[in-house]
Amino acid sequence: MQKKLLARAALMVFAAAALLAVGYVAGTHRPAAGEASAAVTTTPGDKVDPKTGRKVLYWHDPMVPAQHFDKPGKSPFMDMQLEPVYADEGGSSTGIKIDSGLQQNLGIRYATVRRQETSDGFDAVGTTQFDESQSDVVQTRVTGYIDRLYASAPMQRIAKGAPIASLFVPDWLAPQEEYLALRRGGMDSSMLEASRARMRALSIPEGIIAALDSTGKAQTHIVLSSPETGVISELNVRDGAMVTPGQTLAKVAGLSKLWLIVEIPEALALSVRPGMSVDATFAGDPAQHFKGQLREILPGISTTSRTLQARLELDNSTFRLTPGMLMRVRVAGKKAESRLLVPSEAVITTGKRSVVILKNGDGRLQPATVTVGNDIGNDTEVLGGLNDGDTVVASGQFLIDSEASLKSVLPRLASGSAPSVTGTTSATTGGSAPTSAPAATQTYETIGKVENVTPKDITFSHQPVPALGWPAMTMTFNKPASDAFADVKPGQTMHFVFRQSDDGYQLTKVEAAGGAK
């Protein structure tokens, strides 16, 4: 029984070794990039690699990828040969290709750039306010006393014709009694008309004057009523208070019409014109729509919200709206125009430019700088950089949300490995030395032999750095200070830690190889 178990174990080990060998052979003898992809046509003026016959865009040092060279040779930055960047393996002019499985894992979606007839409209917010043109002032033209106050407090709703206050006017008594005496004495009509004119001059209403002939009694009280249905926005008197000519007793703000003040973003201030149609909805009842047209654009930009205010009139004859309501507003343009649209989520804003990830006809991806216009719903207008029918990446931009990511994450996607959002590194295809763009705070470590020491730097013949994809090479690293690592001598084998800085790669720690963790 034990012999059978040993034989079975030996067979499994042999099978595993065979599978590893097959995988190694398949990986090391895969077709060249030029064979796997479509052939690139070369012309007599093109640069061609004499070893492979493939078209070369340029040569570069993978450690300094931004520096391009027109011919092969030794790198001026470190002890290694320049690497060619082929036209058919994802150089800067053709983009990179992402494995389909990786696309699915990352949730990458695509969208088609389309041309569509759209109006030059935008979404905004607005607030309802009292229509100042509907406000009425209740005043007195005579001296009197508040005999009874019907309104109790400001912001009280009141109907048209409802009483606000009863006013006692003692000065009205004498002219009325004089008129009644002349009438009883049989005076001619000219005397009576003169007496009526005197009462009108004392601001006695025509209704009271006409009532003298029918009732024969003088009236010294007048009821002041509301001229409009709305609310009492101001109440400036109390019971028993004395009032003087021209004094404002109350103000009534009408509710049959309201103003809607629309907050327009500063970026759209130049495109707004009076007469543009507005469709407003209240958040509490989105089914109710209130329509109107911009009546006037108010001057001045708010320094706090950076918005321009526009005003329009809303019909509120049903009294459903009240001042202070927040409204969602859609401002429509006067005419529809043909515009090139792309989903807003596909546009990456770097701060200096706008970028989309464009999918080429062969399935490769590359960043494309675009000029964008206004947002139209969930889409963004494209003024330049794309054509109708182009395919762009609509999701997954969190991997490439900055210009640094565009330079470092895209090449890594080509290798078929999911990138990290922080501490990003990259690797090139075809097994050549990688380009790298590590984050400034990311550190790396390896072991190497000290070849040379100067006050400014130390040169190591170091082992590979897997985190950066570096092979074993001889390379010079900067020292943080001239007196740093004073005990390091040529010929020693050291464990060292470094990071990328603006001046290259800088050492942060150097210790004997036995101290490496």
Image (cartoon, rainbow, N blue to C red):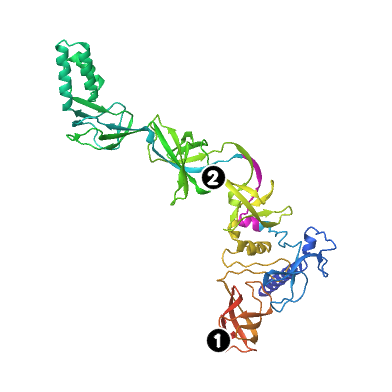
Residue depicted at x 81% and y 66%: 48
Q: Is residue 201 above or below residue 23?
A: above
Q: Position of residue 278 (x, y in %)?
A: 50, 36
Quickly name the residue at label 2.
Answer: 270
Quickly name the residue at label 1.
Answer: 483
Q: Is residue 108 above or below residue 134?
A: below
Span of residues in magenta: 102-117
Estimate how packed mark 2 is, as few (under 14), some (14 to 19) or many (20 or more) residues with alpha carbons within 10 Å: few
Q: Tell me: 256 left or right of 363.
A: left
Residue 106 counted in the magenta span: yes
| Label 1: which secondary element | loop
Q: Position of residue 382 (x, y in %)?
A: 63, 48
Estimate how packed mark 1 is, as few (under 14), some (14 to 19) or many (20 or more) residues with alpha carbons within 10 Å: few
- Name the residue at the right extreme: 44
Q: Quadrant of the image for the N terminus?
A: bottom right
Asked where in the image residue 314 lies, by quadrant, the reply is: top left
Q: Position of residue 139 (x, y in %)?
A: 27, 32
Q: Quadrant of the image for the C terminus?
A: bottom right
Residue depicted at x 70% and y 59%: 95
